[in-house]
Amino acid sequence: MAERKLLPNSVVLALSDDGGTTFDTVVCLTNVSTDATVDEIDADSFCGPDKQPGTFNQTITAEAQHLINPEAGKISGFNLKIKMIAKETLKYKIFTPVPQDGDPIEIGDCFITNLGDTYALDEVPSFSITLACKGLPDISTYEES
Amino acid sequence: MRDNNKPLRKAYLTALSNINVGGVIPVYYASLPPDIDPNSYIVFYPVNNVSSGTMQTQDTDATIRVEIHTFGYQQNTGNDADDIAAVVFQRLLPNTTSTLNLGAGLQCLSTELTDDRTEPFDMQDGRKYARRILTFRHKIFHQ
C-alpha cells in the first residue's frame, strides 16, 4: 500500500439514531474536527513523581451551512437541534464517503452538547455543533475487496 | 458543479429589459453593438465566479457589473443615469432578501450591491457623457 495523504474535503461526519444501522451525513459541512485527550492521573509516591494515563475523552466539533428539507440520508442543523433537545444518544461515524484503501473509519457513541446557529448579514446561515463522545471509539480502516 | 453563467445572464437580461426612463432603455451583454448609438443604454458584463462551496456542495459567489451609460447634448446632469439606476435597484435588489430565479439545479441565495460608482462626467463627440457602474454579488447554491 503506497503512502498518500487524505484528500481535502473527503472526510465527513454522519450520525445514526438507530444504533448504527443507518447513518445520516451532516450536509454542507465546512469543517469537522476532533479533540481527543487522556486524563493525567497523579501517581506520585515516596519513590518520586509519577503519572499514569487516565480516562480517554473526545469531543467532535463540526461547522456547516443550514440546508432546508434535506433528502434521505442527510441531516442538517434544525433536525440536529431536535435530537439535542431530546437528549438522544447517537452513533457517530467519521469517514470518507468515497473511500480508498486504507482510509480511516471512526465509529462511536456520542450526544450533542452544543449547537449554535449563526445568521449573519449577507452570509449563508450556518451552525456549529459539538458532540461529546461516550466510551471508546472503534477505529478501523477501509479495505478494498 | 453546474454552470451558473448562462442562467445568470438570462436572469439579468430579463430583469434589466424594458426599463422605461423617458423611453425604453436598451440593454446589452458585454458590449454595445457597433452599428448603434443610443443616448442611454445599459451594458451588463460577463460573470466572475469564486468558489464558496462546502465539503459536499460546489457553490459559487458570482459577481456581475452593470454599467449605465447616458449622453446629453451640451448638458448632462446625471439625472438619467440615476433614474435608470433606481429602476435597476428595484428590479435586482428591491429588499434585503432579493434573489434571482436561476432555474432547476441552482438556488440564488442572496443579492448584494458591492460597488456603486459614478464616473466623472466628460465630453465625447460634442455630447456630455455620464456613467454609473453598479456591481452585484450573488451567493449561488449548486444543488
Image (cartoon, coloured by chain):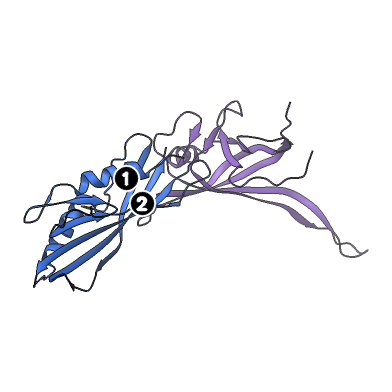
Chain colours: A purple, B blue
Q: Would residue A115 be visible to someone looking at this image? A: no
Q: Quadrant of residue B70?
A: bottom left
User: Which residue appears at 48% of the width and 39% of the height?
Assistant: A80
Q: Position of residue A31 (x, y in %)?
A: 55, 49
Mark 1 residue type? Leu
Left or right, A65 with respect to B45, comes to right
The N terminus of chain A lies in quadrant: top right
Protein chain holding label 2 = B
Q: Which residue position holds label 2?
A: B47
Mark 2 residue type? Val
Q: Quadrant of residue A97?
A: top right
Q: Indicate the secondary structure of the residue bearing disc 1.
A: helix
Q: Would residue B48 be visible to someone looking at this image? A: yes
Q: Which residue position holds label 1?
A: B8
Mark 1 and mark 2: span between their CA atoms? Answer: 8 Å
Q: Position of residue B109 (x, y in %)?
A: 34, 46
Foreground: A18 or B113? B113
Please rate how many residues cluster around mark 2, counting C-alpha atoms within 10 Å: few if below 14, some from 14 to 19, many from 20. some
The C terminus of chain A lies in quadrant: top right
Foreground: B53 or A120? B53
